[in-house]
Amino acid sequence: MMGKWRQYKELTKPRVVALLVFCAVIGMFLAVPGLPPLRALVFGSLGIWLASASAAAFNHLIDQRIDRIMQRTARRPLATGQLQPRQVWIFALILGLASMLVLCLWVNRLTALLTLCSLIGYAVIYTAYLKRATPQNIVIGGLAGAAPPVLGWTAVTGSLHPFALQLCLIIFVWTPPHFWALAIYRRDDYARAGIPMLPVTHGLAYTRWLVLIYTLLLVFVTMLPVLTGMSGLVYFAGALILGLGFLYYAVRLLNPPDEVFAMRMFKYSIIYLMALFAFLLIDHWTLPGSHAALLFRPDAT
Ligand code: HEM
Ligand SMILES: CC(C)=CCC/C(C)=C/CC/C(C)=C/COP(=O)(O)OP(=O)(O)O
């Protein structure tokens, strides 16, 4: 029984989804001064979590054949036969429907619609089509994974705001170095499964240069919140230090010290995004004018 529970949990890609929901929650906090309304916070997070978990389960279903071929994914519940496709279908559908119900009933329809687009974008457009069709798969597909801060923002305000799109852009540009670092290390896996990931189709040297270009672009787009006045000095300092760290990895990757260096960069990419979004929140709360700042310094008007 415990084993089955673990298998279902595995289907939801819990650690990836945790970071997605974290980014969505930061989007909620940045959307308003002070604290966001509790209802949007709780049901928005729940709805986005359910949709992301559903998308991840659909990904397992659609990818079961290639997951069986790749070493990294061969122990997944469908690949090993510990779960049957019918069980995964039902699980993914229930999560997806529950997500739409929660978002429509207790959040708002715009968030429900955008979340549904992200779910379809990842599960159908990326997994079923792009992943097998072009080495630009993860660049385009990255848009679904970049949506959470926007979903969090609309959950709280009911409308789209250019500030939210900046956050989406950050994750969108972060995705290629995040994934290609891993794909460099796992290129044999992808080659064997016949998936046209960039290191397979264009080689390692080309991929490393693109990683560097996207990382430079990332350092630039992470400065947009400062340039547009959404965030202040605390975020600027954090983003700069984190960005310089990422750049160090990207430059070093051109001439890596060892075989596993790309994997070290991949791990850094996750800490990077988590810390960057944490800085956005800390900055938001220390920015003069936000309610929290007023709480800490009642004399500031
Ligand atoms: C199309 C976009 C993306 C692709 C292709 C991608 C690919 C991957 C892959 C293949 C792994 C598995 C690594 C392993 O098994 O060792 C992974 C791990 C991870 N990804 Fe992504 N990713 C994408 C977007 C995102 C986004 C948007 C987030 C969060 C905001 C994210 C967060 C993570 C985290 C936290 C892990 C570590 C999971 C763990 O420790 O098991 N990824 N990613
Ligand atoms: C509603 C919403 C916000 C949806 C977003 C869905 C989501 C789970 C995005 C994460 C991206 C991700 C883990 C891609 C890896 O897929 P892969 O198939 O390339 O990797 P794999 O080989 O590890 O399965």
Image (cartoon, rainbow, N blue to C red):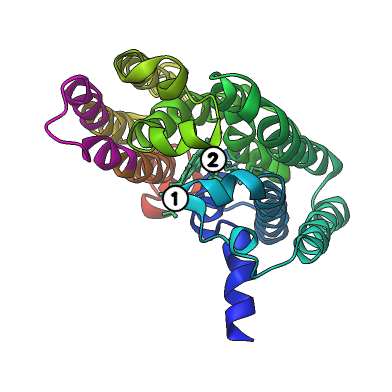
Residue 143 placement: quadrant: top right
Q: Is residue 268 above or below residue 130?
A: below
Q: In which quarter of the image is the N terminus?
A: bottom right
Query: Which type of secondary structure does the marked residue at label 1 adopt?
Result: helix
Give me the residue at 24% from left, 24% from top. 247
Callout 2, which amino acid? Answer: Leu
**Can residue 176 be found in the magenta stretch?**
no
Position of residue 236 in the picture relative to residue 159 (left or right) = left
| Residue wearing tag 2 | 30
Give me the residue at 40% from left, 40% from top. 273
Position of residue 116 in the picture relative to residue 253 (left or right) = right
Q: Which span is picked out in magenta?
A: 245-266
Q: Which of 278 and 195 is in front in this view?
A: 195
Q: Where is residue 233 in the image (x, y as percent from the top left)?
A: 30, 30
Callout 1, which amino acid? Answer: Gln
| Residue wearing tag 1 | 71
Q: Is residue 76 above or below residue 201?
A: below
Give me the residue at 44% from left, 39% from top. 189
Q: Position of residue 44 (x, y in %)?
A: 70, 53
Give me the residue at 79% from left, 51% from top. 107
Q: Where is residue 249 in the image (x, y as percent from the top left)?
A: 22, 29
Query: Which type of secondary structure does the marked residue at label 2 adopt?
Result: helix
Residue found at the very far bottom of the displayed protein: 1
Position of residue 36 in the picture relative to residue 216 (left or right) = right
